[in-house]
Image (cartoon, grey):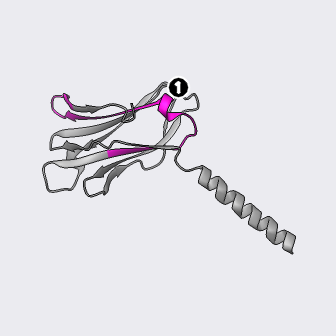
Amino acid sequence: MKTRTSLILSTFMLAFLTLGAMQAQAIIIYDHPVGITLGQTARLTFANIGEIRGFVINWRFIDADGVIVARSERPLTIPFGKMVSVDLGRATLPQPDHRVQIRAEVEVLTPGNPDKNFSTSLEVFDNDTGKTTVFIGNPDA
């Protein structure tokens, strides 16, 4: 009976450690908040420039109160050599103020070297003209 209990406990410990290994490998935080107003969109772009297996990420936009206003519904895969963008239009936010301060976070779930092989940018552009008014490249670059 002791052997069986030890085996069960060992199995649970291994499962717990495995789940811990699935946590984020890196979190990229844009610590420069940007403001968006009506008629503007914030775009977060991800580029896999070197990981053959692809990068799996979660992303989120957070407002000035720390509330997540948009996020990935499920992990997003960025294939090798590809770019993927996600947009947050000001009109989609329920805040009553015309201008809303936001910042972005990206959670890299894939083991690998995101510092070397994963590039990100955050931009704000005008919906009517397409003109970029704010551009922030890799926050760690």
The answer to if 98 sits in the magenta stretch is no
The residue furthest bottom is 1
**Residue at coordinates 46% horizontally, 27% vertically from top-left?**
82
**Residue at coordinates 49% horizontally, 24% vertically from top-left?**
81
Which quadrant holds the C terminus? top left
Residue named by callout 1: 50
The residue furthest left is 98
Residue 98 % position (x, y): 12, 49
**Residue at coordinates 41% horizontally, 47% vertically from top-left?**
72
Image: 68 above or below 9: above
Which quadrant holds the N terminus? bottom right
Number of numbered discs visible in the structure rendering: 1
Question: Which of the 4 image quadrants contains residue 137?
Answer: top left
The answer to if 131 sits in the magenta stretch is yes
Image: 115 above or below 99: above
**Residue at coordinates 26% horizontally, 44% vertically from top-left?**
33
Crowding at dot 1, Cα within 10 Å, few <14 / some 14-19 / many 20+, comes out as: some
Depth order, front residue of 39/52: 52
Residue type at mark 1 is Gly
Residue 120 % position (x, y): 39, 33
Residue 49 appears left or right of 64: right
Segment tinted magenta in the rendering: 104-133
